[in-house]
Image (cartoon, rainbow, N blue to C red):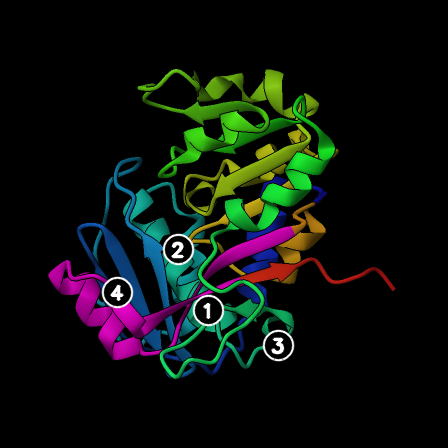
Amino acid sequence: MAKSAWALYDRMIEGIPEDLKVIDYCLGVHWSCVVADCGGGVSYTCRGGAKYRPYDMRGASLREAAALSKSWSFEEATLGIAALNAYYAHPDRALMRNAAFESDDSGESSRIGRKDAFAVFRPRIEEAGRDAKVVVVGHFPNVAQIAGYADLTVLERNCQDAFDTPDPACEYVLPHADFLFTTGVTLINKTAPRLLQLAESACSVMVGPSAVPCQALFDCGLDNISGRVVVDAQEALFSCRTGNRFGSSLRMFTLDAPAQR
């Protein structure tokens, strides 16, 4: 685990070359996008926290934009995470060459097809037994299905369903978890370092388009990152601006932690 909470963010930011520039960006209603000369990245749009102080990021260094991930304005942090993904979430990055991608429009397929992370890990959870403790941070669609084959707890700020538990319960339930699924939004609201520390004995997975496929996260204890890569940056940017679906502009990937040498 990193020595300080900021060490994770500093490593991700410092890994971006200094010569890359932001071309365009959008803080959208639901999703946000940063397009740089190395590619595009997306993030879920979070609002709140400290006061948002917008400025024109076009032409700024991508590393400078990525440093917004440390902001306590969640709008700024949203753009910071999208900027990190513009660099790291690219199929040609060294780490991403080990990822498995969903099938594309040409009919080519991979081992994950169109399964999400919960489906990919279901056999492993079932093998652990019906009493396996699964903790999910964030209320993902259909997450209640996990209760059919494991002991499910959903940490949620606004509890709505039977399996929801207030998120401060993380201090009590995560040390006993066998599996942790956490949204990439925890990178925006700065809870990720503590959640991973609490769940250090669990198999931990970060899920969703906001997840940053970076070695620094694996070094903090993640076992898998299942997110999205932008394959058409301009189309992804247009989708964020208009509220349209991403369609084929994003592709799903799953990436296991590199084996220790």
The type of residue carrying mark 1 is Arg
Give me the C-alpha separation between circle 4 and circle 3.
Answer: 23 Å
Classify mark 1: residues with Cα within 10 Å, few (<14), some (14-19) or many (20+). many
The residue identified by callout 4 is 246
Which residue does the numbered mark 1 point to in the structure image?
63
Vertical order, 159 against 7 (above or below): above
Q: Position of residue 157 (x, y in %)?
A: 37, 24
Earlier residue among tags 4 and 3? 3
**Vertical side of 20 occupied by 101: above or below:** above
CB of mark 2 within 8 Å of CB of mark 3? Answer: no
Of residues 131 and 58, the one drawn nearer to the viewer in this rendering: 131
Residue carrying label 3: 97
Residue at mark 2 to residue at mark 3: CA–CA distance: 27 Å
Instruction: Say what secondary structure mark 1 lies in.
Output: helix
On the question of residue 144 being in view, the answer is yes
Report, in whole angstroms, how far the alpha carbon at label 1 lies from the one at label 4.
25 Å
Q: Residues within 10 Å of mark 4 (few under 14, many from 20)?
A: some
Q: Give, as a three-letter code, the residue at label 3.
A: Arg
Q: Which residue is mark 2?
A: 68
Q: What distance separates the C-alpha of mark 4 from that of mark 2?
A: 24 Å
* Residue 73 appears left or right of 238: right
Q: Which residues are magenta?
A: 224-253
Mark 3 or 1: the one toward you = 3
Query: Where, by quadrant of the figure, is residue 138 drawn?
Result: top left
- Residue 217 placement (x, y as % from top left): 62, 53
Residue 56 is inside the magenta segment:
no
Q: In front of the other: label 2 or label 3?
A: 3
Which residue is at 60% across, 69% downward?
A: 99
